[in-house]
Amino acid sequence: MRSNPRAAALLAALLVALAGCATTDPTVATPGAPASGSASATLAARVVLAKSGGIAGLRDTVTVEPDGRWTVADKTGATRSGQLGPADLDRLRQLTADSRLAGETAATTAPSSCADAFTYQLTVGDRTTGYVDCPTDPDRPAATAAVVELLTRATT
């Protein structure tokens, strides 16, 4: 059997290119491993978001279990429930693991200058943070606000 130098060179180039595809990047899925954003992603702890206030005296509580199942209960006791999609669950997992959130739970906030504004209280595991949604108050805690925005959108 005769060797074809051109075919051998092409095969060598392909093998080199394929060898470069191996990665240790955790954001790249490997065969047989759960992909980022997959339904197998879970939260480290239960997440509870309480939204209260406003002129009507709203009181909603969103509870998200580690597997992404959520329940919203309003002040009358009415509930609705659902399941976060894989992308929302993965994003929530990232946000609740964000080191900024831990810092926000340790920070103290000044009283709000707004009346009838919504107040958000976020509890992740045994840590609680929150803010009043008032445009004249100092900066909102960024990681907490990102979780509030995600849960408000995903559970509506």
Image (cartoon, rainbow, N blue to C red):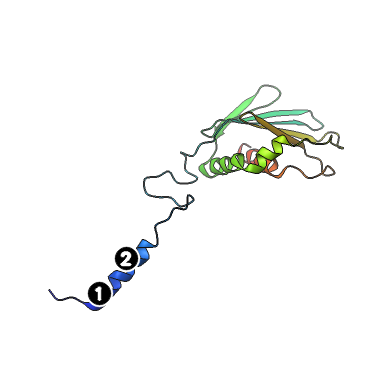
Residue drawn at (63%, 42%) of the image: 99
Which mark is first along the chain, 2 or 1? 1
Answer yes or no: is residue 149 visible.
no
Q: Which mark is residue 15?
A: 2
Residue drawn at (47%, 43%) of the image: 38
Q: Choose between 59 and 132: the one closer to the eye.
A: 132
Residue drawn at (43%, 50%) of the image: 29
Say which residue label 1 marks: 7
Residue 33's spot in the image, x, y percent? 40, 45
Q: Amino acid at mark 1?
A: Ala
Where, by quadrant of the figure, is residue 93 drawn? Answer: top right
Q: Amino acid at mark 2?
A: Leu
Q: CA distance from mark 1 to mark 2?
A: 12 Å
Q: Secondary structure at mark 2?
A: helix
Residue drawn at (71%, 35%) of the image: 106
Residue 8's spot in the image, x, y percent? 25, 73
